[in-house]
Amino acid sequence: MLNVNVICHGTLKERYLREAVLEYSKRLGAYCRLNISEAKDDAGLEELVAAKNKDYKVALCIEGEMLDSLELAKILADTPLKGYSSISFVIGGSDGIPEKIKAMCDHRMSFSRMTFPHQLMRVILLEQIYRGFNINNNGKYHK
């Protein structure tokens, strides 16, 4: 079972977002071991990313590669084939991810050229990870 880490800048204060994260966390329990880490600032974010030195790391940033759900599913499926037991997704704060942290990552991924609130991005990412695992397991959710 793949370990999936979501490393976030900041905490979720809004109850509705925390509830959505909890819902997708429950759903993902069938497919992976999920861990969500929160950093108070960029220095904390860098420390959390550095600690994942054995993970396949994906920075979520606007200049990253735009993928569709099938392509994200393929990344999830291929991560163990590349010799990784864990994948970490990095979500920056309102100013994005500092270049130093992006350089620590193996892949840069963008959800859109649009800007999303980093708090909402956590929910969007978890939903897409859940969709990816559903695709890889021939589930009905994707359809």
Image (tube, helix red, strand yellow):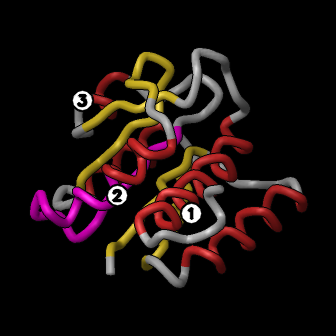
| Neighbour tally class for label 3: few under 14, some 14-19, many 20 plus, Cα within 10 Å | few
Q: Nearer the viewer, residue 41 or 90?
A: 90
Report the side of 141 relative to 61 (left or right): right
Looking at the rendering, the stretch of residues picked out in magenta corresponds to 75-91
Residue 33: name its quadrant.
Answer: bottom left
Residue 87: name its quadrant.
Answer: bottom left
The three-letter amino acid code for the residue at tag 1 is Tyr
Eye-nearest disc, 1 or 3? 1
Residue 130 - label? 1
x, y (%) of residue 138?
A: 48, 69
Q: Report if residue 37 lies within the magenta region.
A: no
Q: CA distance from mark 3 to mark 2?
A: 21 Å
x, y (%) of residue 137?
A: 44, 72
Q: Nearer the viewer, residue 48 or 110?
A: 110
x, y (%) of residue 86?
A: 28, 66
Cβ–Cβ under 8 Å for marks 3 and 2: no
The three-letter amino acid code for the residue at tag 3 is Ala
Residue found 66% across the figure and 47% down from its top? 124
Query: Mark 2 — residue?
Result: 76
